[in-house]
Structure formats: C-alpha cells, structure tokens
Amino acid sequence: MNDLSRPKEKFGTILGYAPGHVPAYSSDYETADDEELPTRQSYRSYCDGVYMGHKWQCVEFARRWLYTNYGYVFDDIAMAHDIFRLKTVRHITDNKLLPLQSFYNGSLRHPEPGCLLIWEEGGEFEMTGHVAIVTEVTEDYVRIAEQNVGHRKWPEGQDYARQLNAEVTEDGEFWIECSFGDASVMGWVVQTDDEEYAECVDEPSPALYNLLKQVGSKSVRKEKSWLNMANPDEAAYVKMMGGYRLSSRDEDERLFYLASETALAELRRATNELHGLYMHATNYVLKDDSLLRYFNIPEVLWPKILQSWSNRRNQMITGRFDFAMSEDGLKVFEYNCDSAACYMETGKVQGKWAKHYRSRVGANPGKRLHKMLRDAWRHSDVDSVLHIMQDHDLEETYHALFMQEAMEEAGIKSKIIHGVDGLSWGKDGSILDHDGEKISWVWKTWAWETALDQIREECGNDPEKLNKYKPGEKHDAAPRLVDVLLRGDIMVYEPLWTLIPSNKAISPIMWDMFPEYPYLLESAFRLTESLKDKGYVIKPIVGRGGANITLVDKDAGVVAETGGKFDDRDLIYQQMMRLPKLDDYYVQVSTFTASGRYAGACVRVDTTPVINMKSDNICLRIVEDEYFQELLDNENQALKD
C-alpha cells in the first residue's frame, strides 16, 4: 500500500483524511517554504490552543487524531517509541487521567481501531521510532493512518496510509509485519482499564541507579604512553594534564566508576526528554518579556536572541546535562548548551584510558560521541570556512582541536583563532582574520556571557548606555570578541539563543511549566516554605563553573559555599539534591547531546559537594545489570563482615 510510484508532495500538502476527517500532511522538510514558515514558532501545531507537536511529525498526527476523536492527548515524549512507556492520557475538558495499556507485538490482546501502533527505534525509524493510528484490524492485516512516512498522497477515497500484513497464531497471538525490512513493530497502546495481557514493566531496583567505585590493574605501567602525541588534540591534552593521565592526583590514576545498563538507559531517556522540555521552555520565555527580564540580559540584545531562535539555521551542535544520580533518583541540575566542556575526555580519553589500564569490563559510554558530533556538523548549514575562536587556554585548546577533528571529518574546513589579536575590518565592514579571510561562521569555546560582560563593562552597567549600545557595528578600534559574536552576518555556534536554556533562570520557569516532572528539581526565584522544608541551593542566575553556590540543609543550615565573581547577580533557589559520595569523592554524572540527542556520558568528581571547573573527569564504564548487582551485593556483604 506504500505506493512508491506516487510523487512526494510538498511540505504541508494534505495527503489524506483519517477517520474523524483528520488530515495527514506531508512532512517533506526539504520543500518547506521559509517565507510561509519563517520561525520555529511557525512549526508548532495547535488545536484549540492545545499543543499537538512539531509540524508534521508522526507524534503530532497521533496526538491530534486522539484529540479530535476522543478529546484526550498523551504527554510530551522525547521519541515516538517512548509512547510505549506511557501509563495515562489526559482528557482536555476535565483534566482527568485515563489509563493506557501497552501490548508487545505477538500479544494475545489484539490491536483495535483507534489504538496506537508503535515501532522500535532503528532502521527506517533510527533513533526516534514511529507511531501510527490503527484504523482497521483483520486477522490478515491492519490498516494505519500516519504522518512522516513517504510524503505521498493516499489513494482516492482511502482513509488510511498503509496496510500491514498480520497473522494470528494457533495460540491466538497477533503478529504484525513491518513493511520496512530494517524496522520492527514494538506493539500497540490501548486506552483501556483492562490490564489482561498488558505488559507489566517492573520498576528497576533503585540500587541499579547507584555508582560503584573500582580500581584498575596495578600491573600496568602508568607512565607508559597511551595517548597518541601525533594527534594534535591528544598532544594538547597531555600538555595540559602534565602527562598521560585522567586524574590530577597520582593516587587516583587507576580509579574508575561503574554504572548499570538500566542507569544508562535512564540517563539517555532523561537527556532526550529534557532537551525537548528545555526547548519548550526557551520558546515560552522568548514570547514573554516579563520572563525574559529574569535572565539579566541587556534588552538591546533581545531582538537578536529572538532572531537567533527564529532562524532555522541556528541549531545546537552539542550541550551537556549535569545530573545527580543515585538510588534516591535522577535529577538534573542544569543544561550547559552555551559552551560545554569535557567532551574530549568523554569521547576519546576515557576510552583510551580503559584500554591502557585493561579495564575492559563493561562498555564505553562515550564511544559514539565523536561520531555524533561529526554527524551534527554534517547536518549544519556551514558552507564556507568555519573559524574556531578560543582563548589562550590549554584546556580550550584540546577541546578546540577535538572538535576540529569532527568538523574535518564532516567535510568542513576550519581555522583556529587564539584570542582576537590580528582581526581587522574589511572595506565592506566585515571582519577579517589575520590572513585577510572574511569570518562568516564561528564555533566558540567562550561562553556568551563573556561577550555580555564585555558589553556591560563598556557601558559601565549604565541602563541608558546599554539600551543604546549597537553590538557588532564597525568602529575605529580593532574588532573585539563582542563585535565578532554579535554581527548579523556571522553565524555562531552555539547560537545566541542558547543563552536562555543555559541560564539558571530557566529552572524556576521549567518547574512552573512542568511541575513534579520526575527529572526536575523544585526551583523558584524566591525562597519558599516548601524549599525550606526540603533544603535548598542558592545559585546566581548568571554563573559558571560552580561559582558562588550555597548549599543549605533543612536541619544543619549552610553545609557548603563556593566563592567566585558572580556574588552580585540575582539568585534562584533550587531544591537540594546531594551528589552521592563514594569514599572521598562526590560524583556527578554528565551526559552530552549532539543535535539535541543523547550522545555520551561521563563522571566528574570532587572532594567538595559542588563540582567546579577544576574537578576531575574519571573513567565511566557501563556493565550489565546482573553483574552490577552482583558487585553491589558483594560490596554490601563486605561492609557487613
């Protein structure tokens, strides 16, 4: 029924009408009209003011079909296959929750018209999975309505997109065959109270979310070279660290940590879901000036941030989530998507460390990071030389070289600029590098806040001067960092809008938007009684590297403070979630995104409860749940003995 002889239709063309007269649209994004859809907001689909999803993806269609026919919707999910995990839908009129039951392909509970058919991630539906609406069921086939597959019109008079072969076994099992050879149907989701044959997914043991401390083999010579000095990024890393090492402390050089496969799956899920929520919150903030004022960003830059968000070319390459993870749960502290660090340690060094120290137990959670960064650059819009701008800092140097390697593998020519010395103005007002080449594309290691600090300093924090400031315009002096980063004809990665999700002011807004969301910590702009009862952390709205943080226990009062240069900034208050402490170290788990998707994980440790810029990266390995539980049981037994 998937007639490939039919031509693909332009984005937004109606392909057909599903039962209930619900239109399905083409989602051929290559044909989307930038004049008709000039901003990100243009791609948000609503019915009666209720958000349905991104035009015109499979999830948007499924939610819109359910709303039109039944009046209920399912919650936001990161990927289509995550629908299989949902337990309820929400009826819009009365906000009542109705039960959902999930059934794996081959279940004795057969699919029925109106249920959701869910595909595994992989193959045709790599990373995302897929969802369709079942419109008709027989013992030989099921018919489905869907979006974002094929982009071709349905035959005249047909209220479904495709027909899939089905078979019922002698035992009554119902099996559906996927028409794509490299994809597979996971099962179906039905709104029903009847739990018979439904998948009862047992909640994992909380202990599987702990971390385990391990020590590598002592028989290995630690001074032996295990990084390749012929590779510029590895040579720069060795120079920065003063040798072949991960830890800054000799006594910890064989130290590493284990996490379970269940923990990694939860980290991956949380990363994908949270990225989507942070993007929702960013869009929400940029539509409301009263919220944007919380971010302490000069108002003269607001139009530029809005323009950056609206420009579809400005996509994130990478960001880093910081988590507390233990048997007490998984909670996110913040999303560093303006200028993240630690990706070379995650994507290259920890894997080579494990090989050298023969820590072959488990798998490397950073193995795919470099490849995914390369793919992110391949899908960027960079079409000329990309200038990498960094400070005269050894850590920034190896990160820049690591990222440059990913750019080159993506086919992007790049040049590294240390500082802004040697930049000049072109006759047409453009900015030229020291070779006289025009700067059009930039990837920076500096945080955007560095440029904002430069503006504040020039204007003496005078509101009137700030409002009259004209960023990026040519002047008599040599070009400065702010001139490069804020010019309209220079595209910067990470884009200017990443100031919003990276700013700690986003946390109270997200808590208001998604209260009780399992991965979020309660946050507010003012200290509440609820936070006093829980214990809380005081953070500057604009701050970096763990500076100016105060931890307040509900009983013991202040238990930790850090210094820094952000003590004059406005504050937020966030529920305290202590990092797990394993022997001498507090341990934080971080995950990376590439193009908004989970791409890798690492751990950082410190003797203090606040991870900072000097905290060590330590190798992380992922092991099977059974092995992890066995090690944990042995450790607990040893403590008892």
Image (cartoon, rainbow, N blue to C red):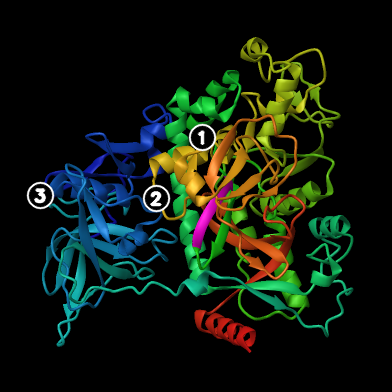
Instruction: Please tell me which of labels 2 and 1 falls first in the chain.
Output: 2
Crowdedness near tag 1: few (<14), some (14–19) or many (≥20) residues, C-alpha within 10 Å: some
Q: Amino acid at mark 1?
A: Phe
Tell me the CA gap for discs 3 and 2.
46 Å
User: Circle 1 — which element?
Assistant: loop
Q: Could you tell me which quadrant the N terminus lies in?
A: bottom left
The image position of residue 35, as x and y in percent, is 40, 26
The image position of residue 515, as x and y in percent, is 39, 46
Between 20 and 330, which is closer to the camera in this rendering? 330
Numbered label attached to residue 525: 1
Tell me the CA gap for discs 2 and 1.
17 Å
User: Circle 3 — which element?
Assistant: loop
Crowdedness near tag 3: few (<14), some (14–19) or many (≥20) residues, C-alpha within 10 Å: few
Q: Quadrant of residue 359?
A: bottom right
Q: Amino acid at mark 3?
A: Gly
> In this figure, which residue is indicated by the disc labeled 3?
157
Q: Residue at left 75%, top 71%?
A: 353
Tell me the CA gap for discs 1 and 3.
56 Å
Image-based side of 219 in relation to 182, left or right: right
Magenta range is 329-335
User: Circle 2 — which element?
Assistant: loop
> In this figure, which residue is indicated by the disc labeled 2?
516
Q: Residue at left 64%, top 81%?
A: 361
Q: Amino acid at mark 2?
A: Glu
Between 591 and 236, which is closer to the camera in this rendering? 591
State yes or no: discs 3 and 2 in contact (Cβ < 8 Å): no
Image-based side of 85 in relation to 240, left or right: left
Instruction: Please tell me which of labels 1 and 3 falls first in the chain.
Output: 3
State yes or no: discs 1 and 3 in contact (Cβ < 8 Å): no
Numbered label attached to residue 303: none
The image position of residue 336, as x and y in percent, is 61, 46
